[in-house]
Amino acid sequence: MSAHAGVVYLVGAGPGDPGLMTARSLDLIASADAIFYDRLIPPGALSGAREDAEFVYVGKQPGVPSVPQDEIGERLVEAGRAGKSVVRLKGGDPFVFGRGGEEGEALRAGGVEFEVVPGVTAGVAATAYAGIPVTHRDDASAVAFVTGHEDPEKDESALDWDALAGFPGTLVFYMGVKRLGENAAALIAGGRDPEEPAAAIERGTWPGQRTVVATLETIADAVERESVKAPALIVVGAVAARRQELAWLERRPLHGRRVVVTRARAQVSGLAATLRDLGAEVVELPAIRIEPRIESPAVHDAIARIGDYSLVCLTSPNGVRLLFEAMAAGSKQEHGAETGRAGGLDARALASATVAAIGPGTARALARHGIAADVIPERFVAEALVEALADIDVKGARVLVARAAEARDVLPDALRERGAEVDVVALYETVREQPGADAIEAAQAADYVTFTSSSTVTNLVEALDDRFPASARIVSIGPVTSETAKAAGLKVDVEAERHDIDGLIQALLEDAAR
Ligand code: SAH
């Protein structure tokens, strides 16, 4: 359900892993007019937002001047009164040490409607990723979320440290690194067992999550020694020792490996997401970028007669995505005027065509639009698609080949030779993109660099120049890409046996296991 005008949504973004964002948060982000966001939101959390949305950063960073809390409330009220649909996006859960309560009160006082969308709070997420169950039949029948930021020496402290020491269950401290020494001492002074297991979890659910286990008495030293930094949680309780049995994050096959992914942004996510699921820390260096070209006259013409094609060939997932965008948008005027229909075209426009996909990724993209590809070749190159289409009589048929501007002409040439009337439309161009300084820096310590096409090699080598990570192992999708890499002076360490993304991941996994 999308965001309503004049309503402010207090939305939890979860602890950092984008996969832990709720479906509702993503829906609201996708439709909001304005998004007020904090510092600790997951990477890419805003990537699904509308391009014309207003983005307002109101994060707090230690030691940096920030927008005062009162002012955040005022600005939310203002935006709501202006009739905007507003997402106020916060790390974790908005009502758990998130000041969501105060913002809700400000909105109510200002006469602005609001809704609260809970998020996965760090107290259960970072612990779960560390293999620490906050409750356990044998160890803890209760759990308390506590702020560690209060000064135990301060007279009017809201925390009763003796009562906390006597709490019969797990204590989870948020914001507890800075005052860990004093807090642990206050618990021990209150009668808590100094030998009780304790853990610090740094950057829970983010790449590079770290967990340090000690005892209540030694945790402060351990945290100091290992220089654990915020954001981190402190867990005090017998459950912290369960990690020995229950740690799972560190067992994933690519845990602790940093992998550079070089693909166009729109495609990067699939490969990156899979690598992350396998435990890798992914550095995305988008060496190439997709520039949609769906406004061109050729695309307009093709869309206007889309129902006339008896064969439609798609050669990439981007092609599929943009063809459907072009159908939805580009035909509105023409068709709307003729038929009185409000919307554009959808999958039904291809109902009478044979649809060919160059490979399984393209077929999956089609499936997302409700189309089961009729033809998918065994090998995922244009020549193989030509072979796979051999049984289809194309003489006199109208054929649409929708693809990238700079693609080879193997497919249209072959179809024309067989008597087809072929329209080739370029839905997009791939252009070079300069990676950001942070990404280049992160890439320096990479264990692997992956190449998924010759253009990624050429572009990345040019973009990184003398900052190409010298010690990383290079993984290539296939022989053509490997040749390009060698010609650029790189040593290819791993080459995929199957020349697609799954094959590349398989090859990387096998290499990492050695
Ligand atoms: N509303 C947030 C908490 C904000 S307070 C939530 O529900 O999670 C900020 C504190 O939360 C940090 O100091 C840290 O103690 C904890 N925290 C937030 N994200 C964390 C993470 N990914 N790993 C460990 N602790 C985290």
Image (cartoon, rainbow, N blue to C red):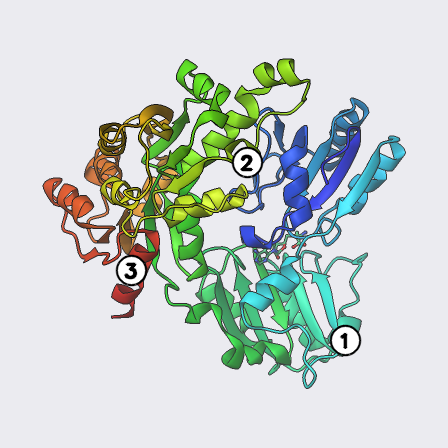
Tell me, yes or no, if residue 472 can be seen here.
Answer: no
Mark 3 to mark 2 CA distance (whole Å): 37 Å
- Tell me where residue 297 sits by quadrant: top left
Left or right of 79 in this view: 380: left
Mark 2 vs mark 1, foreground winner is 2
| Label 1 beta carbon within 8 A of ligand 1 | no
User: Which amino acid, mark 3?
Assistant: Leu
Mark 2 to mark 1 CA distance (whole Å): 60 Å
Mark 3 vs mark 1, foreground winner is 3
Establish if 441 lies above or below 152.
Answer: above
Mark 3 vs mark 2, foreground winner is 2
Query: Where's residue 304, x and y in %?
Result: 50, 19
The quadrant of the rendered image in which ligand 1 is seen is bottom right
Establish if 306 lies above or below 336.
Answer: below
Q: How many marks?
A: 3
Residue 167's tag is 1
Residue 385's tag is none
User: Which amino acid, mark 1?
Assistant: Phe
Q: Which residue is mark 2?
A: 347
User: Which amino acid, mark 2?
Assistant: Ala
Name the residue at 26% across, 56% down: 498
Establish if 342 lies above or below 485.
Answer: above
Tell me, yes or no, if residue 72 can be seen here.
Answer: yes
Secondary structure category for the residue under label 1:
loop
Number of other residues with Cα within 10 Å of mark 2, as a class: few under 14, some 14 to 19, many 20 or more = few
Q: Earlier in the sequence, mark 3 or mark 2?
A: 2
Number of other residues with Cα within 10 Å of mark 1, as a class: few under 14, some 14 to 19, many 20 or more = some
Q: Which residue is mark 3?
A: 508
